[in-house]
Image: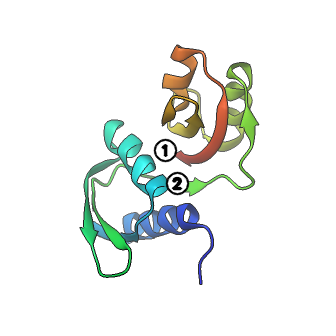
Amino acid sequence: MSFDTLSNAMISIKNAEMIGKKFCEIRASKLVGNVLKVLKNHGYIKSYEFIKESVGGKFFVELSGNINNCGAIRPRFSSSVTEYEFYERRYLPARGFGILVVSTTKGIMSQREAIELGLGGVLLAYVY
């Protein structure tokens, strides 16, 4: 049984991208849905669709081939606006290349949007 749905989702996306698949199925949760929304807004995936099942559901994700690496950040570090640069250096390969997905009081967004709004938050995932 899996306990971290976000980690499983990011690993599924990464593995599907590495072998060149165009589609991927992921177990659904609200957190995963919000992270997929951020990835779609930044062009890392083409689209995603929720498929309802008798118990729970799944996300059917259409991949665009733009992801080199992605993963969940564990443990989920809290970060202020000034600390995002430290975590960018730690998880992303270069400045301005890739995004960190952050949970803030205004919802789940990229670190770039959080910096513009002046919001700190909890780091969830990275993608580049």
Residue 125 lies left or right of residue 23; in this view the side is: right
Q: Say which residue label 1 marks.
A: 128
Residue 48 lies left or right of residue 79; in this view the side is: left
Q: Would residue 114 be seen by someone viewing this image from the given angle?
A: yes
Q: Would residue 22 be seen by someone viewing this image from the given angle?
A: no
Q: In which quadrant will I find the N terminus?
A: bottom right
Q: CA distance from mark 2 to mark 1?
A: 6 Å
Q: Is residue 79 above or below residue 73?
A: above
Q: Which mark is residue 38?
A: none
Q: Is residue 97 above or below residue 23?
A: above
Give the mark nearer the N terminus: 2 vs 1.
Answer: 2
Mark 2 neighbour density, 10 Å: few (under 14) some (14–19) many (20 or more): many
Q: Position of residue 58 (x, y in %)?
A: 34, 71
Residue at horizontal 66 percent and vertical 39 percent from the top: 122
Q: Amino acid at mark 2?
A: Cys
Residue 100 lies left or right of residue 80; in this view the side is: left
The secondary structure type at the circle numbered 1 is: loop
Q: Tell which of 60 and 21 is nearer to you.
A: 60
Q: Position of residue 27 (x, y in %)?
A: 42, 71
Q: Which mark is residue 70?
A: 2
